[in-house]
Amino acid sequence: MKPEKIAGVIFLLSVGVASAADFYFTRGPKTLEEGQSYSRDWENIINWSMTSPTTANELYNVSPWDRLPTSSDRVYFKDNARFNGPTDLASSGIVKISTPVYASYIFHGGGFSTPGITALTEDASINLTVDASNKSSYNSGIGNVVIDNNQWDENFVISANINISGGTSGIATIYNSSARSNGSTDEKDKKNMVFSEGYTITMLPNEEGKSNLLYIYNANARSLNGQACRTGDIIINSKIVTSNYVRLMGDGTAVDGYTPGVIRFSGSQSHEIGNVNGFILASGIVVETGMTNGAQLCDKNVQITNGSTLRLLASDQLTDKCGLQFKTPRTSDPTLMGGTFEMNGFSERIGTLTFYGDQATQVNGTIDFGENSIEQVFRAEGMSVGGGQMIKEGSYLYILNYVLGEDHIYFDIKLSDSNKDMFVFEGYEDGYELSETFIDSLNTWEYSLVAIPEPSIFASVLGIIAISAVCLRRRR
């Protein structure tokens, strides 16, 4: 971010800090005063009300206000906050911004609210700054809510830079609670939250120079009262910039009929994550990565915990130095230890594959090659087992859907016996053993399987060797 941009943000965050108020984006006043005109612009003051319309019959701004939302104010796009202007404006439904705008909390929900916020130009100074210092009672359980999507009729698309700031250290949360609780499995009932290509999600430092934590949290069954539902996805095409790490969270609660959404990365710019922890996958979240144009998800570490899954949608999604870590959650449930790395028909080269424990328990990890007929390669610099009080003897690396001769597992160093003892190839438990072969052309070690000869075959081979030895002696 340019210095002048940061200075402008800090200045504007310091003004207009009257007592926090709730602002509702509505359909404008019933009648226009001289010189006024309808628009979907955030900066058009006639669009804002201090009172939420309660019925669909309230076709106008029920409580006009004399200022725009500032960094201390909460902004709501809710039921019946529709637009009573020209049809060409109403049909788009997009709230447009042309100058930097601010709020402490954005709630997007209801059947007829705006499907997005977009910058009018590609100017990098066009941005939405959300101050994460102001806690919201709506979602106080996981920290300070920044952006919450509860839309049921449209995807919520943000095409603007998101600058997340905070006067005090806290947690900034992007939260998608969009779901249908009628048990439908129809794809159209799954409403997504989309951050558009070409923009950034930037964590700004607080007054002490410390950055807030960024949580990206998908809907959970508990917040939906355990009802069968389909949850939307969070799709991130924007670039994330932070000096801290990013926690990606889902839900570990099993509810019959509950179909959780995923967090999907598909932008064309690599993320800039300053903290060595990188991305932390927690609470059973499924994260998909299909970055394009050579961009990669992370160059630090990706931690998979609590039964979470990292799924490839393309090859080369992590840098060659990015570590992949299977880590224990802070729970005694052994079924949630570690998680799964789904190759999904693609190949990946990483730094160190690590099994790490915060407590005295086993850590199981899974590499799933997927059900396909595609040659795939998993390659790592090395394999590490340690940290905390972990009992490595109880830990396993499960290899799923591995096809002998088609899929490949490489390590750039020769693994220790204790590392090799952790390998479990599903479907090859009987009649095979782990093999270790140095591949000169790649300067790496391949870990595969070889069939164990049947006893009768083994005896025949020994017999042939013995007969050959006798014949050799006779010739001499």
Image: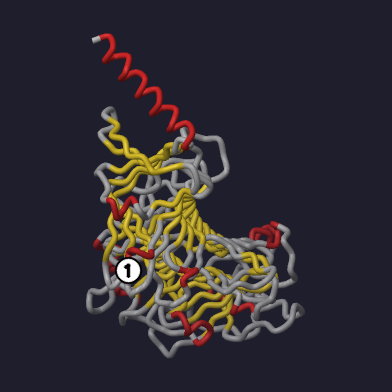
Considering depth in this image, is 137 or 328 the residue closer to the camera? 328
Q: Residue at x 74, y 82 (%)?
A: 55
Report which quarter residue 162 is drawn in: bottom left
Check disc 1 and report the residue beneath it.
391
| Residue type for callout 1 | Ile
Q: Is residue 352 visible?
A: yes
Q: Is residue 83 visible?
A: no
Considering depth in this image, is 253 or 180 the residue closer to the camera? 253
Circle 1: element type: loop
**Quadrant containing the N terminus in the rendered view:** bottom left
Q: Residue at x 38, y 68 (%)?
A: 362
Report which quarter residue 204 is drawn in: bottom left
Residue 345 percent location from the top left of the image: 51, 41
Residue 32 percent location from the top left of the image: 65, 74
Structural crowding at the residue carrying mark 1, measured as other residues with C-alpha within 10 Å and reported as few (<14), some (14–19) or many (≥20): some
Horizontal side, residue 459 vs residue 46: left or right: left
Q: Please, which residue is most extreme toward the top here?
A: 475
Horizontal side, residue 257 vs residue 453: left or right: right
**Quadrant containing the C terminus in the rendered view:** top left
Q: How is the image coloured?
A: secondary structure
Residue 83 percent location from the top left of the image: 67, 70
Residue 167 percent location from the top left of the image: 31, 81
When the figure is inspected, residue 264 is found, relative to residue 14, above or below; the finding is: above
Considering depth in this image, is 411 or 437 the residue closer to the camera? 437
Considering depth in this image, is 301 or 157 the residue closer to the camera? 301
